[in-house]
Amino acid sequence: MASKRKKIAVIGGDGIGPSVTQEASLLLALYRDKAGLPIDLWELDLGADRFLRDGVTFPKEIQIAIQRECSAVLLGALGDPRVPGLEHARDILFGMRFGYDLYANVRPVKALSDRLVPLKDRTMKDVDFVVFRENTEGIYVGMGGQFKRGTPDEVAINEDLNTRKGVERIIRAAFEYAKQNKREHVCMADKSNAMRHAHELWLRVFDEVRREYPTIKSQHLYVDALCLHVIQNPAQFQVVVTNNLFGDIVTDLGAALQGGLGMAASANIHSSDPGRVALFEPVHGSAPPLAGKDIANPFAALLTVGMLLTHLGWPEEERRIEQCVSQAIDERMCTVDVGGHLGTRAAAQWVREQIAKQL
Ligand SMILES: NC(=O)c1ccc[n+]([C@@H]2O[C@H](COP(=O)([O-])OP(=O)(O)OC[C@H]3O[C@@H](n4cnc5c(N)ncnc54)[C@H](O)[C@@H]3O)[C@@H](O)[C@H]2O)c1
């Protein structure tokens, strides 16, 4: 066990973010207090409430302090109907993803119970792959503009930015993950038949990088075909690598195979510099209609803590969290969206109690 203490910044954010993050923080506190993991939590008051109160989104000094002092950030979700322009969400989320150059958004699509798999004749064994979503480029960089806004001649443009460096490093990260985790197959999905310039780059780089990994099988699919195959036979996928937009969409599709967005965890990392601060967040958003009702599923946030602990050097704890969440699902000690009857707090507490018994 590492002896140097690791600082984790915690940002609840908006909507259901603070309540699921509170449960995830309590799990981290359990590991600190009962298992003696050398971690410290640093709660940050950032999100829509703070923005509406004093106009602050993501102060530069906080951004720098996180980078200098923290090993990880745990984030809930951002997005609030009172801030329709999403200024705070963009500054905080992109301030970390882009600002810390966290180019790999790693999203496991893993079903933890047969009961959660909605496909006929499929079980949890069939749903276990990891999506590597490029996280710093593509259509999310905000390049573009509007011309003659509000007139019948209006023009709206968003540019899809793809760099050789960006494409190469995410594809390599996917192959490296496969190599290190004994996965035998990597699939790259693009739309190079329609997006001849940008995605031809993806195709060419994929062809180059895969030659460096002769023991790993590789496949290219157009992203529409990927969606078809993921539903027809998810078991054929082990590692999928794709761009920012497609990764966002494909992982919501994947979440549907895991039991919904309440079950999907994610990490944002700089794969080739693992010592750099990394960001961990559930895949789901702030789900405003569920906020303040104690009904949001906290398991995505708890599973996200598992990914965070693996990143900090305690992979056995990710397995323990997964196993206890799986047990909660099987015993229906979970929220309504996954077939249980408990509220957010009680479901998370039940899982923490199972973990505490084992520590
Ligand atoms: N990374 C992020 O912070 C992030 C990601 C996605 C969306 N958002 C923002 O969140 C807001 C809402 O967006 P949306 O509705 O498209 O996506 P959402 O993920 O908030 O909700 C989509 C659907 O999933 C359900 N859901 C989500 N999380 C759940 C949970 N933990 N338990 C049970 N059900 C859950 C919701 O009820 C809804 O039906 C928007 O402002 C959006 O911009 C933020």
Image: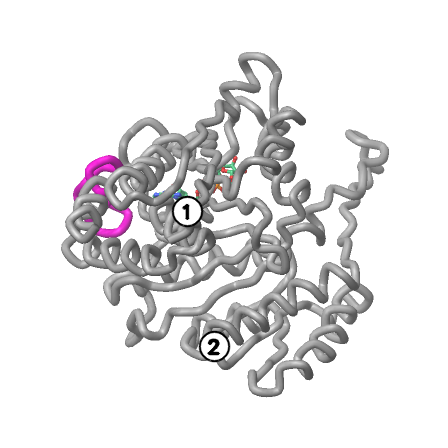
Report crowding for label 1: few under 14, some 14 to 19, many 20 or more residues within 10 A (C-alpha).
few
Give the label, 1 or 2, closer to the camera: 1
- The answer to whether residue 258 shows anywhere in this view is yes
* Residue beneath disc 1: 3
The kind of residue tagged 1 is Ser
Q: Residue at x 59, y 73 (%)?
A: 175
Q: Position of residue 255 (x, y in %)?
A: 42, 57
Where does residue 224 sit, x and y in percent of width and height?
A: 59, 68
Q: Secondary structure at mark 2?
A: loop
User: What residue sits right under mark 2 in the picture?
Assistant: 183
Report how far apart the C-alphas of labels 1 and 2 lie in the structure. 31 Å
Disc 1 C-beta below 8 A from ligand 1: no
Considering every residue shown, the one lying at the far top of the view is 54
Apparent side of residue 95 relative to residue 228 in the rendered image (left or right): right
Q: Nearer the viewer, residue 19 or 34?
A: 34
Residue at 50% x, 28% y is 80
The vertical placement of 141 against 223, above or below, is above
The first of marks 1 and 2 along the sequence is 1
Tell me which residue sits at (66%, 80%) in the image: 210
Residue sitting farthest toward the front: 3
Q: Amino acid at mark 2?
A: Arg
| Residue 296 is at least partly visible in this image | no
Closest to the observer, 115 or 212:
212
Magenta segment range?
A: 335-347
Which residue is located at x 57 percent, y 24 percent? 83
Indicate the position of residue 123 as horizontal and vertical percent values.
29, 72
Q: Is residue 31 above or below residue 255?
A: above
Judged from the image, the secondary structure of the residue bearing numbered disc 1 is: loop
Depth check: give the residue in front, 192 or 128. 128
